[in-house]
Image (tube, rainbow, N blue to C red):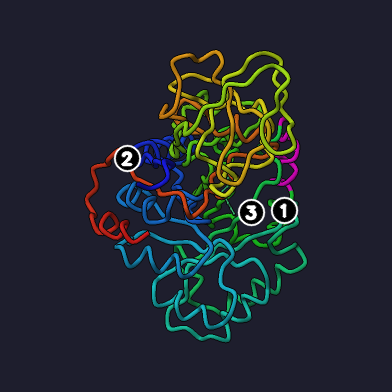
Amino acid sequence: MPRPIQADVDLAALRHNYLLARRRAARGGTAARAWAVVKANAYGHGLLRAAKALGDVADGFALLDIDEAVRLRQVGIRQPILLLEGFFTAADLAACSEHGLSVVIHCLDQLQMLRQARLPRCPPIHLKLNSGMNRLGLVARQLPAAREHLAALACAGGAGGLTLMTHFAEADADGGEACIRWQLERFARMLDDWPQAAALPVSLANSAAILRYPATARDWVRPGIMLYGGSPFATADAASLGLRPVMTLRSTILALQEIAAGERVGYGGTFVATRPTRVGIVACGYADGYPRHAPGGTPIVVGGQRTQTLGRVSMDMLACDLTDLPAAGVGSPVVLWGEGMPADEVATAAGTISYELFCALARRVPVRSVGEVAQESSRAGRAEGRE
Ligand SMILES: *Cc1c(COP(=O)(O)O)cnc(C)c1O
């Protein structure tokens, strides 16, 4: 019998959230296409599982690793696949060309490599401009050189070959509007001396921008966290945004302790009972990906009812308060996050964001797909068993 912990990934919910992202983006007025951002193993949900849920509806898939991109091709994904950091070495370029991958180009070195590679077929390019995030992207003074490289790459000039891209730093923040406006102005100003740029497709918006500033949804949007049912905002919960939870981390109560007032629970004895307390021990700890920083008092659902954790999270277990849940006992089902227990709430209690909870799900937790989707391409489905 395996440990009673598992993560359910609801494929129908993932699909619902993707379609919602695209509908929200359409509010901006253009029929934006949406990259399903599946980097980091689809934010911990399983790359091929995400491909199974979205394979017949997504306009494209965006991720970081060439190996992951090739796996998507191998399971029959024919849509565009975008490498969000582009290629790292000249050797990567052959794979990009062979598998028809689109690449972000964020620095002149990449353009140089591309030019030297003399590929028979040039990959479609998302040219990333640094409009103020100061992480990746070309700055204004590098654009003349970039254009010179692009002109030499005759292959990149064709229709659909070149897209302009930038990334917002504060779309998720309250009052982020000023920053968005400033970045958009800067982006436009960078293109002042490049009249042909006005005709190029543009990709700007992540989840937060799609949801709060749909006017920024231009030709392509890039939803990530919202696909997985996480809210990008500290002040708006996922359900109010119309999102459905995708990952539900489940376990059970594996032991019970009845303690008197004054007794403590767990490492460091950080919880001290102020009344006779029924303590449930849950088979889930930080080695499963539950955040150790979640303090006592973090919400948790036992037998369908909310209660809270007690004391410190251990490697393989955590404690919760069953005093007011008399029907709960050994074997009661527990939801750590997901259905009925928003991951964002747990993340907030732990001082982090749902992105981190999802991505940190440990390898030792078995993941199961639930919520079937009607899917024309079954190859992604068959390959899923290998994950
Ligand atoms: C990860 C990523 C996204 C998705 O961001 P979310 O906040 O998860 O929607 C979009 N664009 C780029 C460039 C990214 O790296």
Residue holding disc 2: 370
Q: Amino acid at mark 3?
A: Thr
> Is 264 on the left-hand or right-hand side of 374?
right
Picture coordinates of residue 217, whole percent (x, y): 54, 42
Sequence-wise, which precedes: disc 2 or disc 1? 1
SS type, badge 1: loop
Q: Amino acid at mark 1?
A: Ser
Q: Residues within 10 Å of mark 2 (few under 14, many from 20)?
A: some
Quadrant in the rendering for residue 105: bottom right
Tell me the distance, in whole angstroms, between the alpha carbons under discs 2 and 1. Answer: 41 Å
* Residue toward you, 188 or 217: 217
Picture coordinates of residue 180, whole percent (x, y): 70, 41
Q: Compared with residue 266, is residue 273 higher up or lower down, i.e. above or below?
A: above
Specify the farthest residue to the right.
Answer: 141
The disc at residue 166 is 3
Does the segment drawn in magenta span residue 322?
no
**Residue at the location (52% across, 27% down)?**
256
**Residue at the location (56% across, 61% down)?**
84
Nearest to viewer (mark 2 / mark 3): 2
Q: Amino acid at mark 2?
A: Val
